[in-house]
Image (cartoon, grey):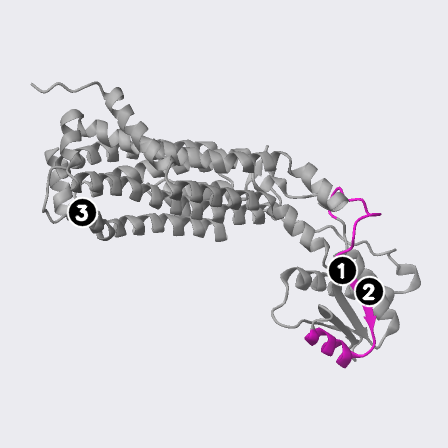
Amino acid sequence: MTRRDPLLPNAGIVARREYRDRVRSPLFVASTFILMALALGVALAPIAIRYLDRQTVDTIVVISSDEDLALRTIAVADSIMNQPPPGADPSTWARPYAIERGTDGSAAQAALASGRIDGVISLERNPDGGLAVEYLTYGPADTVRLTNAGFTSMSVGILDWTSSLPPGSQLGQFQTPEFTTRSLSGPTEGGQAVDAVQVASRSFLGTVFIILMFITILIYGMWVATGVATEKSSRVMELMISAASPRQLLLGKVAGIGGAGLTQYAAIAIPAVLVLAFQEPIAGAILGSAGAGLPTGGLTVGLLVAYGAFFLMGFALFAFVYAAVGSFVSRPDDLQTLSLPLSLIAMAGYFSALLVLLDGGGWLARLASFVPPLSPFAMLARLMVSNVQPWEVVLSVAILLASIVLVALFAIRVYATGVLLYGQRPGLRAFIAAGRKG
């Protein structure tokens, strides 16, 4: 009777060997530094964008044959476009827009075409006494400037109408309204809705996270499959299978490569967390008062933890399948064909996350956040840009963990049969048959 060692010692030996081989490889070291630089760049992106933005002053020229109307428009546009962000010192804050008076429409259009100015607001009075306002831009209209120009034209129209009322009907000086947006389905922090700027920042960060998860899961999964196929093609597997059970070998390989992935994640996340923790002092040192209102909520420790958790669960789910696939090929070169369906499944999860990041995704994206193997991607995206109830996260994680256990049991059965088969043509029927035999 063949004596098998306990599970943990053999699995631990395999895991340590896999971990050591991966973290010492030049590819692992190089990719870690590249991803670390990317994570630091993402963490510092809000400061860099604000720094570059404060160096730019957009020039808007107001054209009108009515001098009083032009001056009134300049005053209103300045009050709307040059509102300091919350917390900024108005005495030191640099205005992002220069609103200037123009007298020649043709000259203003020529300056706009040459890039010397950024926009033209043209106002004329219609025969019926109303105003005709035209906003000129060269190329596609900038959304922020277009919105501000629209508010300006509406405010000038209100002022012009009230100025025509009898003297006793004057309503006092016009006050620029405060305009904010709030989404009922948007993310919250501490019970408070996250503002639109932070939601936009999270959407960008979520795209980076999803791309990183997609790439790393495929890379680490292929490492598992390649390791199994290489050991099988060199006949090393026949010696290993006599010393340890298939379950021990498979769990050790997944744990070792997963540990390498966790090490890489820690090397990437820790510098980003440190930058996040000191982002306000860094912004204050670089931007001064212009750093007020910086969207530091875009990247939080909680979101980094969520990324790490869903990355590990997603990796475990795919790694067991990749190991089963690798056990059925006789040569590592044959993995490319078999790995394509797995890549397509991961890509489906990637696209479901993009739907969430772009427009919330609706009920389809919400369903995907509970269905493995799409849920690691979709639920992370929902946490980034939408309001997710705690029970939804718990349910998604529970379903994902249960799926990992079921897939692992099936993969072990397939692995036990596949590593001893040579010259077989792998296919869906072969995998199902191996799962029944194991």
**Which label lies toward us, 2 or 1?**
1
- Badge 1 marks a residue whose secondary structure is strand
The three-letter amino acid code for the residue at tag 3 is: Arg
The three-letter amino acid code for the residue at tag 2 is: Ile
Residue sitting at 77 percent across and 79 percent down?
107
Give the percent coordinates (x, y) of residue 180: 67, 49
Reading the image, the residue beneath label 2 is: 74
Give the percent coordinates (x, y) of residue 393: 43, 34
- Badge 2 marks a residue whose secondary structure is helix
Q: Which mark sits nearer the N-terminus, 3 or 2?
A: 2
Q: Which mark sits nearer the N-terminus, 2 or 1?
A: 2
Q: Which mark sits nearer the N-terminus, 3 or 1?
A: 1
Q: Left or right? Give the position of 330 relative to 305.
A: left
**Which label lies toward us, 3 or 2?**
3
The three-letter amino acid code for the residue at tag 1 is: Tyr
Instruction: State the residue in front, 127 or 55.
Output: 55
Residue furthest to the left in view is 1
**Magenta residues, start to end:** 85-114
Give the percent coordinates (x, y) of residue 316: 32, 35
**Which label lies toward us, 3 or 1?**
3
Report how far apart the C-alphas of labels 3 and 1 lie in the structure. Answer: 64 Å
Reading the image, the residue beneath label 1 is: 97
Instruction: State the residue in front, 17 or 244.
Output: 17
Instruction: State the residue in front, 109 or 335.
Output: 335
- Badge 3 marks a residue whose secondary structure is loop
The answer, for residue 292, to whether it is visible in the render is no
